[in-house]
Image: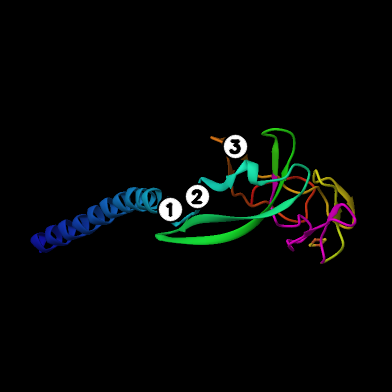
Amino acid sequence: MPEDNENSRRKFLGIAMGGIFGAIAFGYIVPMAAYIIKPSLRRVESGWSDLGPLDALTAGVPASVAMTVVSREGWKEKEEKNNVWVVRGEGDNVTVFSPTCPHLGCGYNWDSARNEFVCPCHESMYTIDGKVTGGPAPRGLDTLPVKVEGGRLYVRWERFRLGISDKIEA
Ligand code: FES
């Protein structure tokens, strides 16, 4: 009889120890795996996109210019084409606007007769330098980061939250 008790006790201790070590290992393995895998599942936009020679743009005339954005979601890489609005100023001075209306995300256009950007969805209006002048848009047009190198214009794609007064990355 005492031997039976001893065996049961050993068995119980074995199971209990296994459970404790298993829980500790699980507690380490899951966060470590999440730490390693999580970044690869995030959506990552590419860096700078080459929009071509700056001299191809006329100062003071907004131009819709195509840009290719490479993004990675998990292990998948995809290419997306977007048209951004580029306004060249004096010299190398250039502003690039996201093509998305900050109200609810429609595409907007330059109306040369009215000399302003107009969104067809709810009639928000913006000056050539992106200030909102009418309609429900809660803020001006969102600018994108730009740089000029070797006479070429480079733009970095970003997305922003819609319908709020602050320009916050989405
Ligand atoms: S989405 Fe442009 S005004 Fe509403």
Q: Amino acid at mark 2?
A: Ser
Is 115 or 3 nearer to us in this picture?
A: 115
Label 2, label 3: how many angstroms apart (C-alpha)?
15 Å
Which image quadrant shows ligand 1? bottom right
> Is 149 on the left-hand or right-hand side of 60?
left
Looking at the image, is mark 1 or mark 3 earlier in the sequence?
1
Residue at 12% x, 60% y is 7
Q: Residue at x 17, y 60 (%)?
A: 11
Q: Tell me the element at label 1.
A: helix
Is residue 30 depicted above or below 76 in this figure? above
Q: Residue at x 54, y 47 (%)?
A: 50
From the viewer's perspective, is the residue at label 2 or at label 3 nearer?
3
Left or right: 170 in relation to 22: right
Q: Is mark 3 within 8 Å of ligand 1?
A: no
Query: Dot 1, how many residues are within 10 Å of its Cα: few (below 14), some (14-19), or many (20+)?
Result: few
Cα–Cα gap, marks 1 and 3? 31 Å
Numbered range of the magenta stretch: 96-120
Mark 2 or mark 3, which has the lower sequence index? 2
- The residue sitting at the top extreme is 91
Magenta-drawn stretch contains 13: no
Mark 2 or mark 1, which is nearer to you?
2
Q: Is residue 149 left or right of residue 72?
A: right
Q: CA distance from mark 2 to mark 1?
A: 18 Å
Regarding mark 3 in the picture, which secondary structure is present there? Answer: strand
Quadrant in which the N terminus is drawn: bottom left
Which image quadrant is residue 81 in? bottom right
Kind of residue at badge 3: Lys
Q: Which residue is mark 3?
A: 147
Q: Is residue 104 magenta?
A: yes
Tell me where residue 121 appears, x and y as whole percent. 82, 67
Q: Which mark is residue 38?
A: 1
